[in-house]
Image (tube, rainbow, N blue to C red):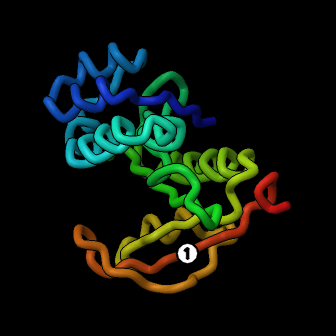
């Protein structure tokens, strides 16, 4: 079972600065040193939440299993005008290959299905990222196109309709 602990902008800025202990204290959960390695992401998400406080409920969550932070997950932002949210998740290398990515994705989908604004959940994955492709398998995602990402290069875009409030 995965639960999510929100990371405030202050916690994210502490991660950007490399201060994992302070970030954990601000989040209320002991973060792993690996979280610091994603400082590029924390800078993006901290700025995003500072510019749009409503984004805070959608982005930047530490993923906790059995009382330990095993990674992070969230959405790229709140639902867009078409009711679409895009998932993002990463598992600390110390905890990989134990089912945590699938558990995170299941929880993200559950969260999306609980919001009446959400109609579609999206995942964008590099074609060579076999782990992420395996993670989304079985969740009803369908290939809908391709896109070019400045960081990752070619990505395949997958989407699935929600089956909760947003599907009405």
Whole-percent x, y for residue 121 in the image: 61, 63
Q: Which residue is drawn at 22% across and 26% down?
A: 14
Using the image as rendered, state which of residue 165 and residue 62 is in the foreground.
165
Residue denoted by label 1: 158
In the figure, 64 relative to 24: above or below?
Answer: below
Mark 1 lies on a secondary structure that is: strand
In the figure, 77 relative to 25: above or below?
Answer: below
In the figure, 31 relative to 92: above or below?
Answer: above
The image quadrant of residue 127 is bottom left
Whole-percent x, y for residue 106 in the image: 64, 51
Q: Which residue is drawn at 23% across and 24% down?
A: 20
The image quadrant of residue 153 is bottom left
Locate the N terminus by quadrant. top right
Using the image as rendered, state which of residue 1 and residue 117 is in the foreground.
117
Is residue 119 something one can see in this rendering? yes
Q: Residue at x 49, y 28 (%)?
A: 5
Using the image as rendered, state which of residue 39 and residue 135 is in the foreground.
39
41 to the left or right of 80 = left
Is residue 99 something one can see in this rendering? no
Whole-percent x, y for residue 38 in the image: 24, 45
Label 1 Cα crowd, 10 Å radius (few <14 / some 14-19 / many 20+)? many
Task: Tell which residue pokes out farthest to the left in this image.
Answer: 17
Task: Tell which residue pokes out farthest to the bottom in this image.
Answer: 145
Locate the C terminus by quadrant. bottom right
């Amino acid at each position: 079972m995965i639960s999510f602990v929100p990371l405030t902008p202050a916690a994210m800025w502490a991660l950007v600065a490399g201060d994992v202990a302070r970030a954990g204290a601000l989040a209320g959960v002991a973060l792993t040193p690996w979280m610091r390695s994603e400082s590029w992401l924390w800078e993006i998400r901290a700025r995003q939440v500072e510019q749009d406080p409503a984004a805070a409920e959608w982005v930047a969550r530490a993923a906790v299993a059995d009382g330990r932070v095993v990674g992070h997950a969230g959405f790229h932002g709140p639902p867009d005008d078409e009711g679409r949210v895009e998932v993002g998740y990463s598992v600390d290398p110390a905890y990989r290959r134990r089912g945590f990515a699938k558990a995170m994705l299941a929880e993200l989908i559950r969260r999306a299905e609980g919001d009446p604004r959400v109609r579609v959940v999206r995942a964008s994955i590099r074609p060579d990222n076999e782990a992420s492709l395996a993670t989304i398998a079985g969740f009803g995602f369908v290939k809908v196109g391709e896109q070019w990402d400045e960081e990752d290069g070619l990505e395949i875009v997958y989407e699935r309709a929600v089956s909760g409030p947003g599907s009405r």
